[in-house]
Amino acid sequence: MRSILVSGESGPGAEVRLQAAIDLAGFFGAHLTVLFSLPVSRYVGFDGIGGSYVVADALEQARADEDKAVATLEQRLTREGVPFDVVRSEEEPGAAIASAARLADLIVLSRSNPLAGDVVLMGQVPVLALPDEGRLVMPPRSACVGWNGGDEAAAAVRAAVPLLAKCEKVQVVRIAEKAGGYPGTDVLRYLSRHGICAELNEVERNGSVEETLAAAVSQSGADLLVIGAYGKSRLREYLFGGVTAHFLQDQSAPALLLAH
């Protein structure tokens, strides 16, 4: 994990997100890229006859505010001693993140950012989605892996190996709701090849899958939860609920590493 991208946007969770990215970069000796997105399209107005114009004063003020935020951030990161660069984009935030993340190993976002779910689906880069409060312990003391044997879960496990390898305790949680499927012992074998000694916790389903997993994670006291994102379609999760949607909305859950 040598290249980390974090959103530099202000608002809820900004400090938690930035500090987590700094801590990760320091711990892994990684390069940190901070992305600022200022979509010019938001400062385009339309007149009554179908013409368009740029609201120049508002755009100029927004750019001045961004200049100030970037200067403050650069001073902080210089003090922190992590290698960094700042990327500025005039695209919409989702497209800007997807573009900047093409050669990133990890994207750090806040769970309160509605784009977190979109970004997971946009590319092949795992997302660390953080609650707005608290601080990510580095290295994480313990982690839970939500395992259902799907491609998404496997992608998340592979992406999480650098973090899982530093944990004192790793627990693989498999919800036993039907016979067959991809056995949990196979993921234990995979992790063991990376020097990660994990234990398997097979739990009986009690309520929905997300409720059952949330209870197991809470009981474990994990600092990090690793799950595959959107094993069901996003529309289906929106209409009927699902694991990804549940944990993206749950600010009380631990740091969430997602991959699709």
Image: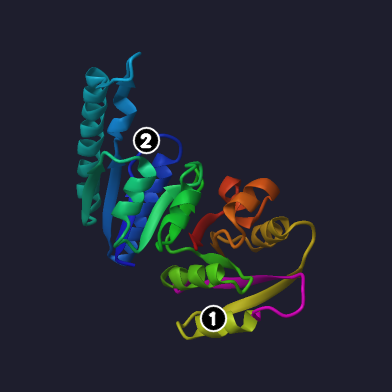
Closer to the camera: disc 1 or disc 2? 2
Whole-percent x, y for residue 248 in the image: 56, 49
Rendered image: mark on residue 104:
none
Q: Give, as a three-letter code, the residue at label 1.
A: Cys
- Label 2: few (<14), some (14–19) or many (≥20) C-alpha neighbours in 10 Å: few
Determine the residue positioned at 66% across, 81% down.
183
Spatial CA distance of label 1 from label 2 is: 39 Å
Question: Does residue 59 lie above or below 87 as drawn?
Answer: above
Residue 217 among those drawn in magenta: no
Residue 166 among those drawn in magenta: yes
Question: Does residue 136 lie above or below 71 as drawn?
Answer: below
Residues rendered magenta in the picture? 164-183
First in sequence: mark 1 or mark 2?
Answer: 2
Tag 2 residue: 10
Determine the residue positioned at 59% across, 71% down.
150
Rendered image: mark on residue 197:
1
